[in-house]
Amino acid sequence: MSSEKENISYQKNDITLDSSDMEKIDNDSESDSTGDKDFIVTPWEVAGDINYSKLIEKFGTYTIGNTLLEKIKDITGEIHPFLKNKYFFSHRDLDVVLDEYSRGNRFYLYTGRGPSGMVHLGHLMPWLFTKYLQEKFDVKLIFQLTDDEKFLFNGNLNMKTIQKYTYENVLDIISVGFDSKKTKIIVDTKHIKYLYPLSIEIAKKITYSTAKAVFGFSNSSNIGMVGFPPVQGAPCFLPSIIENRPTPVLIPAAIDQDPYWRVTRDIAEKLGYPKPAQIHSKFIPGLSSGGKMSSSKPDTALFTVDDPEILETKIKNTFTGGQPTVALQRKLGGNANICPVYWYLNYLFDTEKESQERYSDCTSGNLLCGECKSDMIIKIKPFIKDIQTKREKAQDLIKDFMIDGKEFFDNGNASFN
Ligand code: TYM
């Protein structure tokens, strides 16, 4: 993409802003509060028993229904298991992006990672799907690492630690198998020059009152936090700059990131860019009861760098929906709905038929938790091993993926010479 890199220029200085625009954004905002009595879903916190249908209503997104699935099938010839099993369940403007694609207007994919720890199974899910979409639609991808976000939002993390995680996360991203010719990684603190002009355009259009309503900022939020959202919004418009024409963007991510896209969508057309489209997934649950798998709670997570023995131990110790004794399990059956092991297998490894059988065998007491755990151990070990093998080779590929074409540790230090 070196020729594209040279093409990056910022010519959108014909944009005018005034206070009436700002008021309108506040009134037009699709935004709503992101919390709920029973569960919380924000970009920084996911907790409780998530009701995904309710979340669609709250966030104002759309269910991925059969018509849309058929539209995807018309183009790709198939329906990916993550769509069949409704792991990706919600969207904004996916239909618009597909229609544009059918008319020959290719979209860009955009996804990302906030490097606050090592990569776990939950993070991999949107990336695996993004890789699939990249292949099927033959499209380019911007991958953002928001090291600045993690520094600003996490009181316990310093930049040195975050840089270590950023590097490790880049290895994981590369090991997913994206096409280096069609993928560019942006690390915010390294590559801010590609985002800054766009990010100030966005920032100028969003009032503090909107930011407070959407992100829950308060008087004690540091001002870096308040200023961050436009930086995550900027890659939504970067493809239009790179391609020098309005270029649709599709963002695969779990639904926790939606607040960022809501504010970005609100102001997109005012800045002359297409509204970014999204395809939202559910969450991979953590190993303990309730909540999502989270790198800030390492005990809840299966990491890509875990040794096979660690994976095995973690899964053996996982909370399940089973009864306290074998006799009770046989008599009463288990509760697959609250069982992380059931969902790991459902989302990632079981076929539709296998998952249905597992569900009925579990709930009728024919299946014991140890059996599901051992199925999971058998499936997860080679899956993670494969990533680890690719991770070892990823170091040599970093330059090919970085938007500036440089090595990760090449900081291009300032000099007066
Ligand atoms: P982060 O690092 O929290 O998460 C990275 C991606 O993984 C998804 N995710 C999960 N998906 C399923 N189950 C889970 N348990 C789980 N935990 C996290 C997130 O939704 C996300 O897609 N601010 C972002 C970084 C970012 C970004 C983006 C993400 C910048 N630009 C564009 C998505 C799209 C963050 O901290 O993600």
Image (cartoon, grey):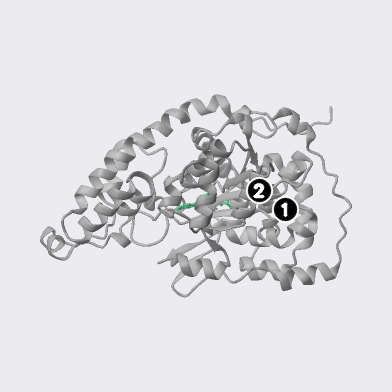
254 over 136 or under it: above or below: below
- The answer to which image quadrant residue 361 occupies is bottom left
How many neighbours does mark 2 have within 10 angstroms: few (below 14), some (14-19), or many (20 or more)?
many
- The answer to which image quadrant residue 257 occupies is bottom right
Tell whether 9 sits left or right of 126. right
Tell whether 89 sits left or right of 349. right
**Quick check: can you spot residue 308?**
yes
Q: Are marks 1 and 2 in contact (CB under 8 Å)?
A: yes
Residue at the disc numbered 1: 274
Q: Position of residue 101 (x, y in %)?
A: 64, 44
Q: Amino acid at mark 1?
A: Pro
- Closest to the observer: 391 or 321? 321
Determine the CA span between mark 1 and mark 2. 8 Å
Q: Position of residue 301 (x, y in %)?
A: 39, 49
For label 2, being within 8 Å of ligand 1 is answered no
Tell whether 232 sits left or right of 300. right
